[in-house]
Image (spheres, rainbow, N blue to C red):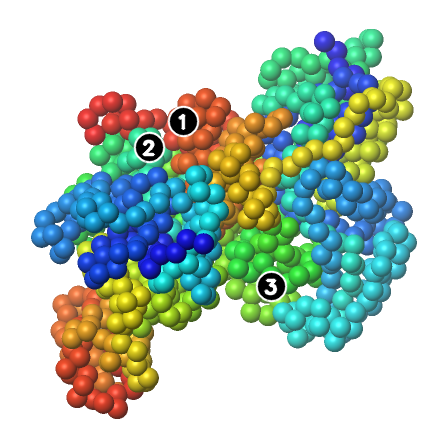
Amino acid sequence: MTYDCIIIGAGVSGSATARELSKYDLNVCVLEKGEDVCSGTSKANSAIVHAGFDAAEGSLMAKLNVEGNEMMGQLAEDLDIPFKRNGSLVVCIHEEEKGGLQDLYDRGIANGVKDMRILDKKELHEMEPNLSDQCCAALYAPTGGIICPFMLNIAMAENAAMNGVDFFFNTEAETLKRDEEGIWHIRTNNGEYKTKYVVNAAGIYSDVFHNMVADKKIHITPRRGDYCLLDKEMGGFVSKTIFPQPTKLGKGVLVSPTIHGNLIVGPTAIDIEDKEATATTAAGINDLIAKGGMYVDNLPIARKVITSFAGLRAHEDAHEFVIGEVKEAPGFIDCAGIESPGLTSSPAIGKMVAGIVCDLAKPEKKANWNGKRKGILNPSEMSVEERNELIKKEPAYGQIICRCESISEGEILDAMRRPLGARSLDGVKRRTRAGMGRCQAGFCSPRVMEIINRELGIPTEKITKSGGKSVIAPERTKAGKGGEA
Amino acid sequence: MLSYDIVIVGGGPAGLAAAVAAREAGTESILILERDHELGGILNQCIHNGFGLHTFKEELTGPEYAYRFMEQVFEKKIEYKLNTMVMDISADRVVTAMNKKDGMFEIQAGAVVLAMGCRERPRGALNIPGYRPAGIFSAGTAQRLVNIEGYMPGREVVILGSGDIGLIMARRMTLEGAKVKVVAELLPFSGGLKRNIVQCLDDFGIPLKLSHTVVDIEGKERVSAVTIAEVGPDMKPIPGTEERYTCDTLLLSCGLIPENELSKSAGVELSPVTSGPVVNESLETSIPGVFACGNVLHVHDLVDFVSEEAKKAGENASKYVQKTLASSDKESIKLVATEGARYTVPVTINTDRMDDLLTVRFRVGAVFQDSYVSVYFDDERIMHLKKRIMAPGEMEQVILQKKKLAEYPDLKTITIKIEKE
């Protein structure tokens, strides 16, 4: 079968594009090399919805950032995922650098960011009492927000799947070429896929696919960002997202509450070669501990970390999103170089890329498209009566599996039973938060494994952390095999 | 709303012993709430022996030790609910819990005994750099996989941390045919019991490298190698001392943290040293009628002492609901741990409410040889006990006599310190 459109990559850009395309009468599929959506750059970032004052005036980044930010409220509602406009502050710690805030403000105005204000020291400290005394002024952008990148990505993909988009996991696009009839042949580890249009949403690998077909080459540098995630005890330390003033390497180390109530500190910005090197380093973590503490007083980062991780930004040399059809490769549409503010921009990116495909394919709109998706229930937000009603109907909601985050068996089962359901520990974790708390799955992982085994019939010794060779407990013990212990 | 005289949060060794003692002290209405599907807590996965030498004068396995107490709970027909998670405890002792059968429900408790135990410090909290593949387990999680579920976490193992569970798992994995290549310990001494180092490492030829830590974890999907390095006195890795071990598994045994999230939400005051509640001579927390015992109070190395402590907590909870726990306006004596001693349990003593003998437990912060445990009543040294060796991994105790305290009616502070002479 020949698809109308194949999207390479099920990260936020690919999933947003898939959802937009699912509005039309098109055969669409997504090829993902990971075992789940949200397996690359989309899973490891600041989880921030940027206001849009950073990107250069007139750039595509600026345009899509502001558009994406504006779309996020409605999208989060439609997809039933948590999103909060907690507001962001770019904080100045040197009197002589206050002018930088005005530049950012002016750029924000040019980019179309609404409701920004420059705060003096007094107002700033009233807003954020834990900021250090040296913070003397700030740019306040109330449209800045926080979101769960996993949930956004998963929800967009799920909604696309509900509306007929096929997703193929563990399917890695290797090479692609266009035949005489203009059909694209994509070779993968799972055979060949054919399509009229290709969307290159391959994240950190998007230069590889672009360069296979385009004359003008692009170059993506994996720019590593280390992060520390702090215990929920620290979640209220600041209420806004606190940025330092930006530098050439990016927006600097931020300190922000997360949508789930933790505190995040990061990222570093280290250019590397290896597109898979998501290892944190001691130097990176130490850097965060030092920088995170510059703007806030007495933040016990080192003692309150529950996990650290690193993500790779897909940094294109020109520091601009590369979106559009490659002229010399008709039907090949780039969605490359998507680095920060990529998560924020993703709804607008999806719309733009889908628009390009539709201009070429000229499809009809589907009459029965359903853009709403019901999220996994969050019983902790229910009243006692509602919760008891739920447990009476579905007793699994009365059994807590992840004690740190209070996640019930019902939520975990739901995560497996829905479209594009979880099949691994990380899949369950990203959909439900089971294992994301302060014990970091120490207690719940054997129990989640038992549920995966029971529900999906995956033998316990084949259950993985995140697909591939990431098997948790590869064989039986002597007694487990039926022998003498 | 349901109502019980005593609600015990946790059905592990502490909760069971507290329940039995409270019943023996005459309280009928007792309810144990246990989150797992059976009573016994962490002992169920501790299938090695060495439990009960103090309590029963014999060597039992963990499940056997737990069963001794479970039998008493069954015989005394003490009520318990399994698969039941306590979601909240309020300052006025309303316990909110949830399970499949009853849904979410509230219980008004006359007294509450906190016996939730502890959790292991995870990799993330240790700031170990490197990849985050499968194959990194806290030692207790690996113990559960091996001993309860019957699955092997891996074949070639490096262990970071020489806490008791790590040492026990070094032996257990070896007996299951795995190769344990090295145990690295950040500190210059082990946090585990001496007998475990001998029986679990030395007897199997497993090297213990003190003053070493993990500086890199390799493997994008599954652990493929771990690099350790020596640390200097500042606990920072010394460049050039790196040693790389190919392996598929990293076990972490780097400390236990009392699980006091419920205590916190109730408003119980916690000690920054133990992370457990601050308690008085009756093992009562800062909230009257809320008692604590076992690893939720401070991490123990021997379950026998957990049982002993829990018995006191259960008896005192019983006295509290029967209103026989002496009320007293007398100012409490403060216990201070200093100069080598890290903390004491309890933290205050009201002599009107104490038994004839009171065991004060504490830990030292470093290894001390041929030193003395000294107890000062204000400025006067009252006790001076010679110890050949004291180590952070082994809990210490002194026993105070009510008779002796009565001789010091104006006593304000009891200080415990370690002295060379």
Q: Quick check: marks 2 and 3 in contact, CB under 8 Å?
A: no
Q: State whether residue B256 is above or below residue A317.
A: below
Image coords of residue B96 (percent x, y): 46, 53
When asked about the image quadrant of residue A420, the answer is top right
Badge 2 density bin: few <14, some 14–19, many ≥20, Cα 10 Å: some
- Local SS, label 3: loop
The amino acid pointed to by label 1 is Thr
Dot 3 surroundings within 10 Å: few (below 14), some, or many (20 or more)?
many
SS state under label 1: helix
Q: Which residue is mark 1?
A: A460
Q: Chain of mark 2?
A: B
Name which residue lies at 73% across and 68% down: A92
Between B315 and A161, the one lying in front of the other is B315
- Position in image of residue A363 (x %, y %): 87, 19
Co-location on one chain, circles 2 and 3:
no
Mark 3 residue type: Phe
Q: Is residue A337 above or below residue B361?
A: above
Same chain letter for marks 1 and 3: yes
Sort mark 1 into few (<14), some (14-19) or many (20+) by Cα contacts within 10 Å. many
Real-space CA distance between mark 1 and mark 3, rounded to the nearest whole angstrom: 41 Å
Mark 1 near mark 2, Cβ–Cβ under 8 Å?
yes
Q: Marks 2 and 3, Cα distance to the nearest angstrom?
A: 40 Å
The residue singled out by tag 2 in the image is B149
What is the quadrant of the C terminus of chain A in the image?
A: top left
**Residue corresponding to mark 3:** A237
> Which is more toward the observer, A280 or B402?
B402
Q: CA distance from mark 1 to mark 2?
A: 10 Å
Point out the tag, 1 or 3, that comes first from the N-terminus.
Answer: 3
Left or right, A336 with respect to B209, comes to right
Q: Residue furthest left?
A: B57
Classify the position of the N terminus of chain A by image quarter. top right
